[in-house]
Image (spheres, helix red, strand yellow):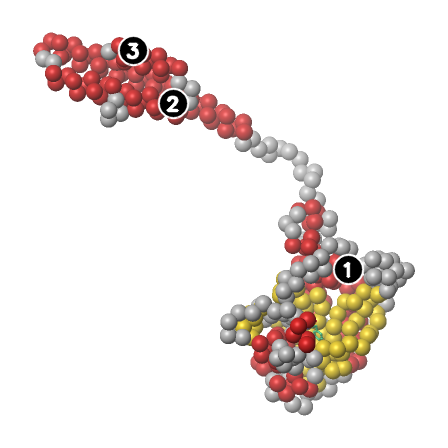
């Protein structure tokens, strides 16, 4: 019984719920002091047994009441602590986040899509995993063609790969639809490139128009209209270029708005910014998809590049970092 008395003092001094449970087990657990005392009753008899049983029951009641009180106090204390540490002040005024147009890449993508779909271009998304035929061979880029080296590719088994440009959607469209075709394809593209101006994943917009008589004048008109709608009053310069799947091919530059063509870091002191590639669909491409007697033009541009130029962002990597300040700037 002496041991049981010190237990009550111990219970009084307990500071947390864990220690409280330890004391409870010490008394009422399977091998607890009280449990043992009750078991030992069988060695007693008569009046002595009745008296001892009475004492033990009294103690049990006292202990249980004290234990319950202590538990309540400690639980209330714990809740108090939690409320303190997890405090959320819902009345705080929102003075910080000003709202934005969304991520500049999505914003740019939506602007481009809206421009072309309003002019009758049908939106295609295409697949991210393509085969060698659609991504290269059908686009007049046979095996060992040097253009493949410029598009360092992520390969899977069985000639499957992550598309290195959106141009394979041209091939799918021409295989699946009868001309006239007027489409844009928008989405992610992948190349094994990673430095300050390249990321392994980027996005492109592709355009394709196929009909009975399509010429370079159509291409010029469509792209110049787009560039003025997108960038405002910039100058547009056409430069002869090369792509295996277009002939003739041209790249298009706009005048550098960062320096008013005086020369700066962004335009590398040239006064011009390259924004897209384009050309008339190469006859070999038509042959590869089994089309005859048609003409077409195609163009492609990088969404990151257009977003950087129109939103005045100078680090490509900032598109892919999850920094809210980036969104707040728009
Ligand atoms: N696919 C080309 C690239 O990724 C861009 C392009 C598309 C050029 C269509 C001409 C016509 O660089």
Neighbour class for label 1 at 10 Å: few (<14), some, many (≥20)? some
| Sequence-wise first label, 3 or 1 | 3
The answer to whether 49 is drawn above or below residue 178 in the figure is: above
Q: Residue at x 26, y 17 (%)?
A: 60
Side (left or right) of 62 relative to 287: left
Q: Do callouts 1 and 2 mark residues in contact (Cβ within 8 Å)?
A: no
For mark 2, give the secondary structure: helix
Give the image quadrant in which the ligand numbered 1 is located: bottom right
Kindly indicate the quadrant of the structure image that contains residue 134.
Answer: bottom right
Residue at position x 82%, y 66% in the image: 254
Q: Which mark is residue 5?
A: 3
Percent of width and height locating residue 189: 63, 66
Mark 2 crowd level (few <14, some 14–19, many ≥20, 10 Å Cα): some
- Residue at x 58% of width, y 67% of height: 154
Between the C-alphas of marks 3 and 2, the distance is 18 Å
**Nearest-to-viewer mark from 3 and 1:** 3
- Tell me whether the residue at label 3 lies in contact with that at label 2, contact meaning CB atoms closer than 8 angstroms: no
Residue visible at 14% across and 12% down in the picture: 50
Q: Position of residue 329 (x, y in %)?
A: 73, 48
Query: Dot 1 corresponds to which residue?
Result: 309
Question: Is residue 233 visible to us here?
Answer: no
Indicate whether 75 appears above or below 304: above
**Which residue, given by chain and number where applicable, does mark 2 sit on?**
19
Toward the left, the furthest residue is 46
Q: Quadrant of residue 138?
A: bottom right
Q: Residues within 10 Å of mark 3 (few under 14, many from 20)?
A: few
Location of the N terminus by quadrant is top left
User: Where residue 280 sits: x, y (%)?
Assistant: 73, 81
Secondary element under disc 1, as helix, strand or loop, is helix
């Amino acid at each position: 019984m002496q041991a049981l008395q010190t237990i009550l003092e111990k219970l009084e001094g307990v500071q947390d719920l864990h220690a409280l449970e330890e004391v409870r087990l010490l008394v009422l657990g399977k091998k607890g002091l009280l449990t043992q005392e009750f078991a030992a009753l069988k060695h007693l008899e008569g009046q002595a047994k009745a008296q001892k049983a009475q004492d033990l029951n009294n103690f049990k009641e006292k202990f249980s009441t004290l234990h319950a009180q202590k538990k309540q106090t400690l639980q209330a204390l714990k809740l108090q602590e939690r409320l303190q540490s997890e405090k959320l002040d819902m009345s705080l005024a929102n003075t910080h986040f000003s709202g934005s147009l969304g991520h500049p890449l999505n914003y740019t993508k939506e602007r481009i899509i809206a421009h072309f779909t309003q002019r009758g271009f049908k939106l295609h998304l295409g697949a991210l995993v393509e085969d060698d035929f659609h991504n290269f061979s059908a686009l007049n880029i046979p095996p060992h063609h040097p253009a493949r080296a410029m598009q360092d590719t992520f390969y899977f088994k069985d000639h499957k790969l992550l598309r290195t440009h959106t141009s394979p959607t041209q091939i799918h469209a021409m295989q699946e639809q009868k001309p006239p075709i007027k489409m844009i394809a928008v989405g992610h593209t992948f190349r094994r490139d990673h430095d300050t101006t390249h990321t392994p994943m980027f996005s492109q917009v592709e355009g394709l128009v196929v009909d009975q008589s399509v010429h370079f004048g159509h291409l010029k008109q469509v792209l110049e209209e787009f560039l003025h709608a997108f960038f405002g009053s910039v100058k547009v310069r056409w430069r002869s270029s090369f792509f295996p799947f277009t002939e003739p091919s041209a790249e298009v530059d706009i005048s550098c708005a960062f320096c008013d063509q005086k020369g700066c870091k962004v335009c590398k002191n040239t006064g011009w910014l390259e924004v897209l590639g384009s050309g008339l669909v190469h006859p070999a491409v038509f042959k590869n998809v089994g089309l005859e007697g048609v003409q077409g033009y195609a163009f492609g541009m990088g969404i990151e590049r257009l977003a950087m130029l129109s939103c005045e962002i100078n680090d490509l990597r900032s598109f892919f970092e999850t920094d809210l300040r980036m969104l707040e700037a728009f």
